[in-house]
């Protein structure tokens, strides 16, 4: 069951898009330009209010511009023909999967169990874990978050390096 607050958040961008889409086209703009503005304004609003994640919002917007006939499909999805764009999209999808599955945390715990007998071993485990999961995480912050807790839980007050950390 979807919470009423979330349902309202998710309905807001659609209502906003419909309102702007059906509003009279301002002077100086073509109808397709106004409709494109309405759809992407709703997509940005959806991300800002937390109704949908960025990837979901952009995919809904791309589908909406095609389904409403604002832009032909070949033009709407032309950006995905570029291999660099696909690489970034796939990197974010893989990173999300690794975070949700807890794989990064499990790799960190494994490395800490193998090398975490001393402060120097913990440092090595952090470096090795970073090298192992770096291809899957496009974000340094995400990599650090997945390594932080296992390394900290392994530190004891008797470690020489734990006072500095």
Image: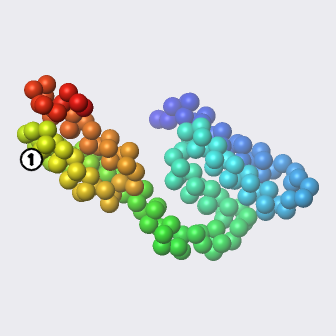
Q: Residue at x 53, y 49 (%)?
A: 54
Q: Is residue 117 above or below residue 158?
A: below
> What residue appears at the point 27 percent right and 38 percent down from the top-left corner?
148
- 155 up-or-down from 124: above or below: above
Q: Looking at the image, which residue sits at the far right?
A: 27
What residue is at 60 percent from the left and 72 percent from the top?
A: 78
Q: Indicate the position of residue 39 as horizontal and vertical percent values.
A: 69, 53
Q: 134 or 161: which is nearer to us? A: 161
**Callout 1 environment at 10 Å: few (<14), some (14 to 19), or many (20+)?**
few
Find residue 142 and report its horizontal and vertical position in percent.
Answer: 36, 46
Tell me which corner region of the image, top left, top right, bottom left or bottom right, holds residue 153: top left
The answer to whether 150 appears left or right of 78 in the picture is left
**Residue placed most toward the observer, 112 or 28:** 112
Side of 95 relative to 147 (left or right): right
Residue at left offset 27%, top offset 45%: 102
User: In the rendered view, does 96 fall on the left or right side of 161?
Assistant: right
Residue 13 position by quadrant: top right
Judging by the rendered image, the residue that carries numbered circle 1 is: 114
């Amino acid at each position: 069951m979807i919470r009423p607050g979330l349902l309202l958040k998710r309905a807001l961008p659609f209502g906003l898009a419909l309102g702007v889409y059906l509003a009279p086209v301002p002077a100086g703009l073509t109808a397709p330009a106004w409709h494109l503005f309405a759809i992407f304004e709703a997509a940005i609003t959806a991300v800002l209010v937390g109704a949908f994640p960025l990837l979901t919002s952009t995919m809904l917007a791309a589908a909406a511009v095609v389904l409403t006939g604002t832009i032909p499909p070949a033009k709407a999805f032309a950006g995905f023909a570029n291999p660099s764009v696909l690489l970034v999209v796939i990197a974010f999808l893989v990173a999300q999967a690794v975070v949700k599955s807890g794989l990064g945390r499990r790799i960190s715990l494994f490395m800490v169990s193998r090398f975490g007998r001393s402060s120097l071993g913990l440092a090595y485990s952090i470096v090795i874990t970073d090298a192992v999961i770096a291809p899957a995480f496009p974000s340094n912050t995400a990599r650090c978050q997945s390594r932080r807790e296992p390394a900290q839980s392994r530190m004891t007050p008797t470690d020489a390096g734990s006072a500095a950390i």
